Image (cartoon, rainbow, N blue to C red):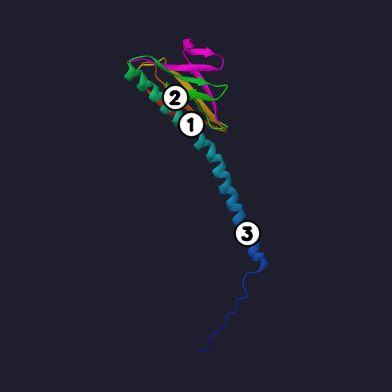
Amino acid sequence: MRRQKFDSDGFSLVELLAVLALIGLIMGMVGGSIVRNLDSVKTRRAGKDVMTALRYTRGQAIITRQEQWLEINIERMTYMAPGKDAVTLPEGVEITVKTALADILDESTGRIRFFPDGSSTGGRITLLAGRREWLITVAWLTGEITLEDLAASG
């Protein structure tokens, strides 16, 4: 029986360049996807943090049996819950607030109030980073707080 001998001299330069080009192309697509998703993650995390601060504020109103409010400064990009330090939003995240007229302190600061029974003045907080937009809604009658991804629903 005859045995064939296979000589392997390795890969040619053309083969190596083709593989490297393919790897570069794949990494470029994956890297672009990761960068686009960072805006979503950053905005969602900021939305959850604001939502947590709103729930804390509502809880404080119920526990202390006194009005409490979350104050939002759109110029400084900060929000502050009762008894807590101001929290600055991550870089690149913008915030807008729509609330009751009585809760607009000046052109850059507004607040959402909660009452001892858990109800609220209500309001809407929008967080935007890149193309990602999240909406936090506070129901005035119940004080219920919801977070919605507007990019997913639109």
Q: Is residue 57 magenta?
A: no
Magenta residues span 93-116
Q: Is residue 90 above or below residue 34?
A: above
Q: Is residue 91 shown left or right of residue 56? A: right
Q: Is residue 29 shown left or right of residue 63? A: right
Task: State which mark lies toward you, 1 or 2.
Answer: 2
Task: Please tell me whether the stretch drawn in magenta is mainly helix, strand or loop.
Answer: strand
Q: Which mark is residue 84?
A: 2
At 47% from the left and 17% from the top, the residue drawn is 111
Q: Is residue 23 shown left or right of residue 111? A: right
- Residue picked out by circle 1: 46
Residue 72's spot in the image, x, y percent? 50, 21
Q: Secondary structure at mark 3?
A: helix
Report if the CB atoms under discs 1 and 3 are less than 8 Å apart.
no
Residue 97's spot in the image, x, y percent? 51, 20
Task: State which mark lies toward you, 1 or 3.
Answer: 1
Q: Which mark is residue 20?
A: 3
Outermost residue to the bottom: 1
* Three-letter code for the amino acid on which mark 1 is drawn: Ala
